[in-house]
Image (tube, coloured by chain):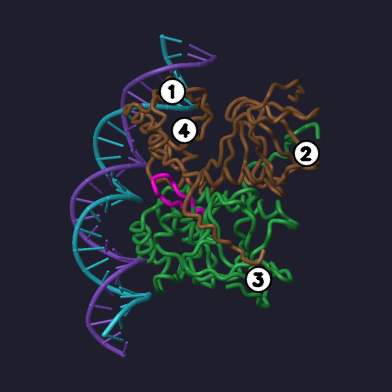
Chain colours: A brown, B green, C cyan, D purple
DNA sequence: CGCGGGTTTGAACTTATTCAAGTAAAGTGG
DNA sequence: CCACTTTACTTGAATAAGTTCAAACCCGCG
């Protein structure tokens, strides 16, 4: 299962260090489990991953999707969620020892979590779906949706029915077209962005006040 | 505004280092703003804080409440959210330099974010409110709600009407009593926990598989 | 060709939001 | 300290939105 191929340029500018292990995972297989001792972290080389947590009533909550260049499992102590392959995927596996830019990775994960929290705070299904689509990697006007409707539903806190209806509705409104079940075309990116309530990245009144006078 | 009092034991076992600055904030005042360069981080000594982000349509999303012993603003580069005082509050202010256990703090923030994501994934208002109440500091059977209904609504992705109705409904069902607007009594903690869909902290089938064979 | 999983859609129902009053609590100024 | 004003909270009724239940559809695959 383990290979050590040569590697092309990565999505995030990340480059594979010499000798990093490359592992393949079949659709649906787990990379690690929530609560397990975190001994490795991974860089997605290709394919798509998801992380999920479970409620005592059996309900599943997806907490993230991960694409080429993304990092999963970079956690001290124990894994915060279970990671599974959405598609056939290859991952670089790294040991927890010899980690140079630890807090930088955690920082990015925290920033992602905060964006996701704002997404989930959106009230209507159309807003959530729009925000979700915008967060996905785009290939020109096209978006690949390798995950199932159930995955999207468990990610957005909606049902598969609502996901399906919302796609149909957005298509009817001329915002997107479904080229296939797992491939969309974005016809009106601006309206999609407006729907998503895109966050203001430079916000609010900053009156140059010194928050901590004695430093 | 700045004082440097002696300090009692903190909620989380955190102890105030000699000479850490102690600052007071009035209700509603900001500690720092989203996007500002993160030059300080803070430990809540007393009072309650909130962090929030804003959408381009003006919608506010609260991303957290912080109580005595909690840490806010521990972020590399720039603040991820604006922090404001919900009540009169006193904070210890620390410079970013000389931070010993950096990744540990980020780790905790990330774990909190993940729990919150699962909370927001809950579909019904009663579930969200129950999960919210359970996440709050308890004083015996009592819970203090210093924040407004609007704060709770913006935190849970609901309206103030739904928050209010849900409290009334939970009271009608004998799960809690409203002793005042800002103080609740939990009459049936087990039913509240069940409603919240408390997360399984020791989850899933862990078959002792080695995820990364060559380490 | 037919089976089966995943998806879409319709209809009835449930839940949350909106709109509109009301009520309680918290200032404010005499 | 009390009337007055303002703000926050609660509640009712109508509307809109999401879920549930049920059926049909589509597409890949044996």
Closest to the observer, A157 or B161: B161
Q: Residues within 10 Å of mark 1 (few under 14, many from 20)?
A: many
Q: How many labels does the image show?
A: 4
From mark 1 to mark 4, how far is it between C-alphas?
11 Å
Q: Nearest to the eye among marks 2 and 1: give it.
A: 1
Closest to the observer, C5 or A84: A84
From mark 4 to mark 3, how far is it between C-alphas?
43 Å
Which chain's residue wears label 3? B
Side of A86 relative to B129 (left or right): right
Q: Is mark 4 on a helix, strand or loop?
A: helix
Q: How crowded is mark 3: few (under 14 residues within 10 Å), some or many (20 or more)?
A: some
User: x%, y% of residue B41?
Assistant: 64, 59
Q: Nearest to the eye among marks 3 and 2: give it.
A: 3
Say if mark 2 contacts mark 1, CB within 8 Å.
Answer: no
Residue A66 numbered mark, or none: none
- Please report the residue visible at 48 percent of the width from the left and 55 percent of the height from the top: B196
Residue A133 numbered mark, or none: 4
Q: Mark 2 points at which residue?
A: A95
Residue A185 numbered mark, or none: 1
Q: How crowded is mark 4: few (under 14 residues within 10 Å), some or many (20 or more)?
A: some
Closest to the observer, B102 or C10: B102
Of the residues under marks 2 and 1, which one precedes in the sequence?
2
Say if mark 4 contacts mark 3, CB within 8 Å.
Answer: no
Q: Mark 3 points at which residue?
A: B10
- Please report the residue visible at 60 percent of the width from the left and 47 percent of the height from the top: A110
């Amino acid at each position: 299962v383990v290979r050590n191929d040569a590697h092309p340029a990565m999505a995030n500018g990340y480059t594979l260090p010499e000798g990093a292990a490359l592992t393949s995972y079949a659709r649906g297989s787990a990379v690690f489990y929530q609560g397990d001792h975190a001994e490795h972290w991974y860089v997605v080389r290709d394919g798509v991953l998801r992380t999920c947590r479970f409620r005592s009533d059996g309900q599943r909550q997806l907490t993230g999707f991960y694409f080429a260049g993304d990092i999963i499992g970079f956690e001290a102590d124990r894994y915060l969620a279970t990671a599974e392959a959405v598609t056939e995927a290859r991952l670089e596996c790294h040991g927890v020892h010899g980690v140079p830019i630890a807090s930088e990775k955690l920082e990015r994960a925290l920033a992602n979590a905060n964006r996701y929290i704002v997404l989930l705070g959106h009230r209507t299904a159309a807003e959530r779906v729009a925000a979700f689509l915008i967060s996905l990697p785009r290939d020109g006007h096209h978006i690949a949706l390798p995950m199932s409707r159930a995955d999207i539903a468990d990610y957005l806190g909606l049902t598969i029915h609502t996901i399906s209806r919302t796609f149909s509705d957005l298509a009817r409104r001329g915002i997107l077209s479904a080229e296939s079940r797992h491939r969309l075309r974005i016809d009106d990116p601006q309206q999609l962005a407006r729907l998503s309530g895109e966050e203001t990245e430079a916000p609010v009144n900053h009156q140059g006040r010194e928050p901590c006078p004695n430093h």
